[in-house]
Image (cartoon, helix red, strand yellow):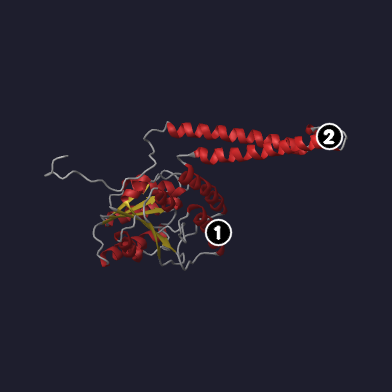
Amino acid sequence: MISIVVPLFNEQESLRELVDRIQASVTNDQLGDFEVLLIDDGSKDESWKTIEEICRDSRSVKGIRFRRNFGKAAALAHGFSVARGEYVVTMDADLQDDPKELARLIGRLHEGFDVVSGWKQTRYDPWHKRWPSLVFNGILRYFSGLKLHDFNCGLKAYRSAVLREVALYGEMHRFIPVLAAARGFQVSELAVQHHPRVHGVSKYGVSRILKGFLDLFTVVFLTRFRYRPQHLLGGIGIACCTVGGLLLLGLMCLWCLTRILAGVEPLHLHERALFYLSMVLFLVGLQMIGVGLLAELVVANSGGRSVPYSIAETTQPHPEKPAS
């Protein structure tokens, strides 16, 4: 079975056409059994009423309504938790993602990949969405090492095993390929068709840019230093202590040389600005090392709640051969 998870917010005008396109695409490409999960993230329009009407006409569509707007990541997380399919596809409800791409996405999963991320190679969005997205994608490619062109594309396909291991919260939905790759899953990219928005308005704003860059730091930390935080925090601490110590040592040497060789009374150390800078760096370095130790204690006591590995498969002894 294929589960198609569609988070939505105020998209009443596009829902019926979207479901019709999905059903036509699945039928024409003979993709087999499928379900469509419409997650209403607290819409203020008639989206839920439209979803109820669609569900009465189709047994393959299920609607879920949040009490208020909790965000796209929450909608996707709940959709993943109730999805029954071996393959899970996510797409936006604004008709900009083309359901005709479903067969190509599933086909790429059949090639052995665990995650297939869509790439809006020709994108029909205003400049204030495209340019920040280009910068964001470039920075994320550099820090994550995952060579995807478009991390923000809502059209993605997953094996269900990936979604059982990747936890979503906050605004982390756009980083699922990065989190999956960090656990050893195979990630691929596929150029997909993108359409201009016809109905409704974009939910994209300036606050999303700021949140995206803050979440970027979180993802880099989680993927690289989640199970060894002292390597990052302690490294910063040692660097600060080293610079502070060298500055203090240099000031002391300068004071001695001035007094001994020049024979004049030099300024006292506390009268120099570099003295206070060196002390601040040294104290900050000690604090960073202490925070790193506390973080290591948290990781050490987390037990099996979050394991740093992912098992692909196991083998069993042959039933006809005795154990040696």
Dot 2: element:
helix
Q: Can you see residue 161?
A: yes
Q: What number is the disc on residue 5?
A: none
Q: Reading the chain from its start, which is encountered first: label 1 or label 2?
A: 1
Taking the image as shown, residue 193 lies to the left or right of residue 281, namely left
Taking the image as shown, residue 155 lies to the left or right of residue 266, namely left
Q: Can you see residue 42?
A: no
Q: What number is the disc on residue 260?
A: 2
Q: Give the amino acid at mark 1.
A: Val
How far, Cα to Cα, is label 1 from label 2? 56 Å
Dot 1: element:
helix
Q: What number is the disc on residue 135?
A: 1
Taking the image as shown, residue 317 lies to the left or right of residue 107, namely left
Which residue is nearer to you in this view: 137 or 47?
A: 137
Question: Residue 54: x and y, percent?
Answer: 31, 56
Q: Pick out the residue farthest to the front.
A: 261
Quarter of the image that includes the N terminus: bottom left
Measured along the vertical axis of the image, is residue 83 above or below residue 276?
A: below
Which residue is nearer to you in this view: 78 or 203?
A: 78
Which residue is nearer to you in this view: 296 or 59?
A: 296
